[in-house]
Image (cartoon, rainbow, N blue to C red):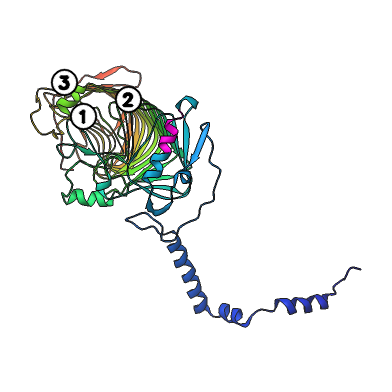
Amino acid sequence: MVETLTPSSSSSRWTQFHHPRPWITSLFSNPKTLLTVLWIAVIFSVLLWQRDATTGILFFRRDFPVSQMPKLRTVAFNLTEFGGVGDGITLNTAAFERAVLAISKLGKKGGGQLNVPPGYWLTAPFNLTSHMTLFLAEGAVILGIDDEKYWPLMPPLPSYGYGREHIGPRYGSLIHGQNLRDVVITGHNGTINGQGQAWWKKYKQRLLNNTRGPLVQIMWSSDIVISNITLRDSPFWTLHPYDCKNVTIKNVTILAPIFNAPNTDGIDPDSCEDMLIENCYISVGDDGIAIKSGWDQYGISYGRPSTNIVIRNLVVRSMVSAGISIGSEMSGGVSNVTVENVHVWNSRRAVRIKTAAGRGGYVRHIAYRNLTFVNVRVGIVIKTDYNEHPAGEFNPKALPVLEDISYMSIHGEGVRVPVRIHGNSEIPVKNITIRDMSVGITYKKKHIFQCSHVQGRVIGTVFPTPCENLDLYDEQGHLVRRSGSQNASDIDYDF
């Protein structure tokens, strides 16, 4: 028999089992009390997500759902299998080393994959091996220990002669690899955090006797893929591929404070060949990207250019240096570089080539296309007096060659000086092409399109009015005016 409730019995039964508590009624009837409760809830929510600015560790740890990590190699390990503890306190260097050793024995089977699950995995520097995939789950954070006594010293890079900041050895990187093949660092946007704050402070206080180490450095290697991760707070340069071939970097976020995080370049391809950088967000305390190939006589002697590099689909910010740079260490040469679909915002400079007498080498066959500058002090920069040199003698007659550089579809707003191409009598800038440029300016002054010792052409509509050093062509490529003042100079660094 099914019981049927009449309206009156239903109301009576609801009242019996769901009679509101008197304290709830009084709570919601008092506006001040209700407001206090809401503020407590808001403050607790903020604390729940608040990060400590120094360590990056959560006050209240967020529990990430354990999502399935894809198996990208025949054999996959979890860091916990080798004794890893992700509490942000336990040092996991030995666990990483044991895992890498196990993978190093699987080369003939296609290598192995090391999964780093959610957690905070404190570690000193460790090396990768060939045929290895390092996979960082969502919520996985590899933390670099910030005590330099745990960081090994390494010989200077041969194309630099000695440590970039000090004569003698340099600190190694947190994640390092040499003479490797087929290495992948990827994940579900896990993080590698260098905890650079202590390094930056000691550097500014002159307490370090050796050059700081990068966050990730891969040397003399090939077939490298780095994707779908976040790199942050490197002690020095963040991602440094050195003398590598066939490198792909995509869907990577690179972060450091925009001030007081010295030399935290985002990506520094150095003497690299056949490289793709795409779909990245970079906001750091120095150059977003800086293409390099060695320093003065050491780079000339090493003789490895950076060539065949494509950079595309990036958003970049650099309040201290430039969004994308070439140099200044370019003594082995830089050529065949394409930079396209790049948005540079709230930056000191947008795209820059920097060099000096003594560098030697060359920068040639460089194409910039579809660039947007927003709130940038100087848009396009070529600088030929960037006089930082290694200790000891360098050859001032080793003059770099700058030629065959094009800028097409350049747009933006809030730019103080759209163009500053500063060649000189010893290092003229040759065969520049600028086409389809319209950049909104913040100062309606003369000399905002600045040139010195530059030869080349402007094609079609360009705003603001270009310098007289350049030949003028119409949209169809017909010569309108030939320049008679290629060596004129109107460089003005006062604004």
Q: Which residues are magenta?
A: 99-106
* Disc 1 element: loop
Q: Main secondary structure of the magenta part?
A: helix
Count residues near mark 2 (Cα–Cα under 10 Å), then give few for <14, some for 14-19, many for 20+. Answer: many
Amino acid of disc 1: Cys
Please report whichever mark, 2 or 3, sits nearer to the chain's N-terminal start: 2
Residue at point 41%, 35% (across, down)? 101
Which residue ends up furthest to the right in the rendered image? 1
Marks 2, 3: nearer the viewer: 2
Question: Disc 1 marks which residue?
Answer: 467
Count residues near mark 3 (Cα–Cα under 10 Å), then give few for <14, some for 14-19, many for 20+. Answer: few
* Disc 2 element: strand
Residue 314, percent from left and from top: 39, 36
The one of 70 and 343 positioned closer to us in this rendering = 70
Residue 164, percent from left and from top: 19, 37
How many numbered badges does the structure rendering display? 3
Question: Disc 3 marks which residue?
Answer: 484
Please report whichever mark, 1 or 3, sits nearer to the chain's N-terminal start: 1
* Disc 3 element: loop
